[in-house]
Amino acid sequence: MSATVPTTRTRVGKYELGKTLGEGTFAKVKYAKNLQTGDCVAIKIIDRDRILRHKMVEQIKREISTMKLIKHPNVLKLFEVMASKTKIYIVLEYVDGGELFDKIAKYGRLKEDEARRYFQQLINAVDYCHSRGVYHRDLKPENLLLDSYGVLKVSDFGLSAFSKQVREDGLLHTACGTPNYVAPEVLTDKGYDGTASDIWSCGVILFVLMAGYLPFDEPNLMGLYRKIQKADFSFPSWFSSSSKKLIRRILDPNPLNRMTIPEILGNDWFKKGYQPPQFDQEQDVSLDDVDAVFNDSEEHLVTERKEKPVSMNAFELISRSQGFNLENLFEKQMGLVKRETRFTSKCPANEIMSKIEETAKPLGFNVHKKNYKMKLQGDKTGRKGQLSVATEVFEVAPSLHMVELRKTGGDTLEFHKFYKNFSSGLKDVVWTTEQNAE
């Protein structure tokens, strides 16, 4: 295998940027290394022009301020904020245990004790946020990360709201969040209490952890909304009676009757094996860097040096493939596919791109191509509307390509379903060894 000469990586201030960890409408998250300390971080990169164009400056500023103010062992830490002329860089704690949902996708439902432990950490984090006047509003397993010790970290405050956004009636008025996890009152236009709606989402998460599937799941959005508004769901046989009682009280469609966090904290099922959070020593938090980023002063700007590699060298290839083994590059067991997967092909790059497009369109995906990258965006009308997948073709050698598929938006469960159908349509371009093809 011939390896290309490595090119210079992107560097921003004292950080060297690595691979993309996730993508959203307005931001991209990249792995990075602090060259002064050697620490690993995640950097959220936001396009300045786009947020100005969409009048989102206040929302982004609020997100950054929120995360700087929240200092809790179960909430992702924000270290610092930087800006260049075109981008805003938010330096975050890097956690390498993946999404909590990956555990369910790989191993199936969790045992009751393990589910309870994660639920306790989630409630601790949400309770703390609420005490600081912050509501998350998009709690779901994809926003719950795990560190290498299995400690839960709540991430993505992009949809969070400060209490000062609450109107005179004391209610929030922006319908947002992911439909399956959203409280019934959020789906109406009457306004809602951010505290009660977050608690509902926590109840759905607990059900998913213990059941391995969603309590409310309909292919049709209106059908899904009807089920949520009536709290129309049933428990699997393995749920204990005390856990069923707790979940039933949390998933009460009437927010005024719904269980509160103090009631959850006092519940016997919840209290079993409970460990209160251990806080680091409290330090003063300054929002000066947040203000500096959003003013027009050039004094604090960082520069970005960027050279883009045109092909993947052997070292990068090996680093992307755990236990480098061609048989594992295209998983036979679909349950092992996480938020990203990859396969190798001996076909020309153009042919691979065409085949991906040809396979994705009948599955209800819009295709956007740029060089050897492609974005697959799900049809907006159904639940697939939330799913988006990024694909990229890398040249490993003149006659060998690697194709990477990565979920960049939407539900991980949807990505698994999509991948199962998608992979069967790509069999013509996937390179398999004779042993692999048996």
Image (cartoon, rainbow, N blue to C red):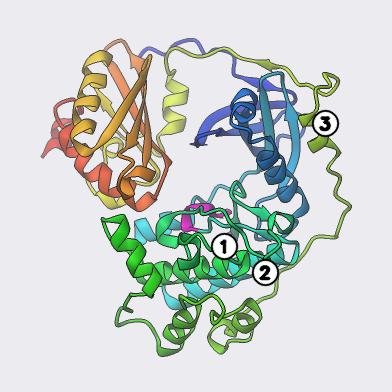
Secondary structure beneath label 3: helix
The amino acid marked with disc number 2 is Asp
Point out residue 259 in the picture as x, y percentages from the top left corner. 56, 80
- Residue on which disc 2 sits: 127
Secondary element at image label 2: helix
Image quarter hosting the N terminus: top left
Residue 212 appearing in the image: no
- Which one is earlier in the sequence, the residue at label 3 or at label 1? 1
Query: How many residues crowd mark 2 within 10 Å: few (<14), some (14–19), many (20+)?
Result: many
Image position of 15 with respect to 250: above or below: above
Disc 3: which residue: 292
**Residue 272 appears in the picture as rendered:** yes
Within-10-Å neighbours for mark 3: few <14, some 14–19, many 20+: some
Dot label at residue 191: 1
Foreground residue, 400 or 71?
71
* Direction from residue 174 to residue 207 in the image, left or right: left
Q: In what element is the residue under mark 1? A: loop
At 33% from the left edge and 41% from the top edge, which residue is drawn? Answer: 380
